Amino acid sequence: MTRVHSFKFVLLALVAAFALSGCNTIQGFGKDVKKAGGELEEAAEKAKN
């Protein structure tokens, strides 16, 4: 593995760790996605009317 590949792997691992720690758990991630979907649906309804 070259130095560039190692750097990319470490960077990807750090990004994944921060993303998962932001919602703490997979269940929390599901709630975040559900909330975002609900807000998107409400915005679409408002735009339609």
Image (cartoon, grey):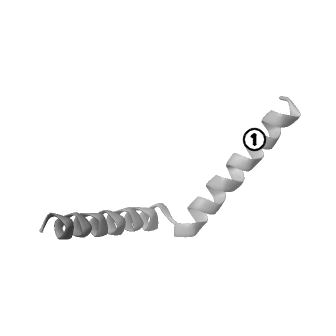
Secondary structure under badge 1? helix
Horizontal and vertical percent for residue 4?
83, 35
Outermost residue, top direction?
1
Q: Is residue 34 left or right of residue 11?
A: left
Q: What residue is at 64 percent from the left and 62 percent from the top?
A: 18
**CA neighbours of label 1 inside 10 A, class few (<14), some (14 to 19), many (20+):** few
> Residue 28's x, y, as percent?
44, 68
Instruction: List the residue tagged with mark 1.
Output: 8
Residue 41 is left or right of residue 4, and the answer is left
Image-based side of 43 in relation to 4, left or right = left
The answer to whether 6 is drawn above or below residue 47 in the figure is above
Q: Please tell me which residue lies in front, 25 or 41.
A: 41
Q: Measured from the top left, where is residue 46 in percent x and y?
A: 19, 70
Residue 41 seen from this side: yes
Above or below, 13 relative to 4: below
Amino acid type assigned to the residue bearing label 1 in the image = Lys
